Amino acid sequence: MPLVFQYCAEIFPSTVRAFTLGIVAFISRELCSMIPFVITFTEKLEIHFVSVYLFLGLLGLLAHFVLPETKNKPLPK
C-alpha cells in the first residue's frame, strides 16, 4: 500500500476518509499518466523535466505557509 494512502487514513476523520482516499487515488493516477506528456513538453522547451516537478514541490511548500493551521482544532463530526 502506498504511503500516501496510509497517511490519509491516519489524518482524516472517518466521515470523509473514503472520499479523501478516492480523491488522492485519482490525483496520483492522473499525475502518473501525465509523466510522458511532461517529458515531451520539457524536451520541446529544452528544459529538464525534473524542473517541472521542482516547481510543483515549491508550489506545495508555498501552500504550506499560506493555508491556515488546523492543529488542535475540533474535527467535524
Image: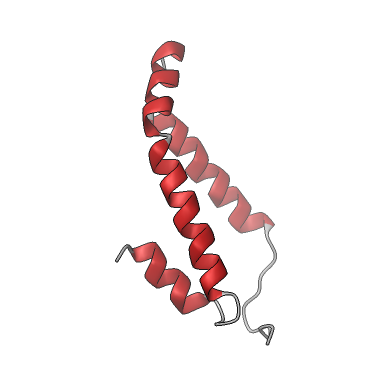
User: Depth check: 51 or 65 in front?
Assistant: 51
Residue at the image point whose x is 44% and y is 42% from the top: 31
Quadrant (top left, top right, bottom left, bottom right) of the C terminus = bottom right
Tell me: residue 71, above or below residue 23: below
Tell me: residue 77, above or below residue 71: below
Whether residue 62 sits left or right of residue 1 in the image: it is right
The mark tally for this picture is 0
On the image, the x and y values in percent for residue 52 come to 46, 31
Residue 75: which quarter of the image?
bottom right
Residue at the image point whose x is 43% and y is 50% from the top: 28
Find the residue positioned furthest to the left.
1
Residue at the image point whose x is 48% and y is 44% from the top: 57
Quadrant (top left, top right, bottom left, bottom right) of the N terminus = bottom left
Residue at the image point whose x is 50% and y is 76% from the top: 11
On the image, the x and y values in percent for residue 22 come to 50, 62
On the image, the x and y values in percent for residue 15 come to 60, 81
User: Depth check: 44 or 63 in front?
Assistant: 44
Whether residue 45 sits left or right of residue 19 in the image: it is left
Residue 41: which quarter of the image?
top left
User: Depth check: 66 or 12 in front?
Assistant: 12
User: Depth check: 39 or 52 in front?
Assistant: 39
Tell me: residue 38, above or below residue 61: above
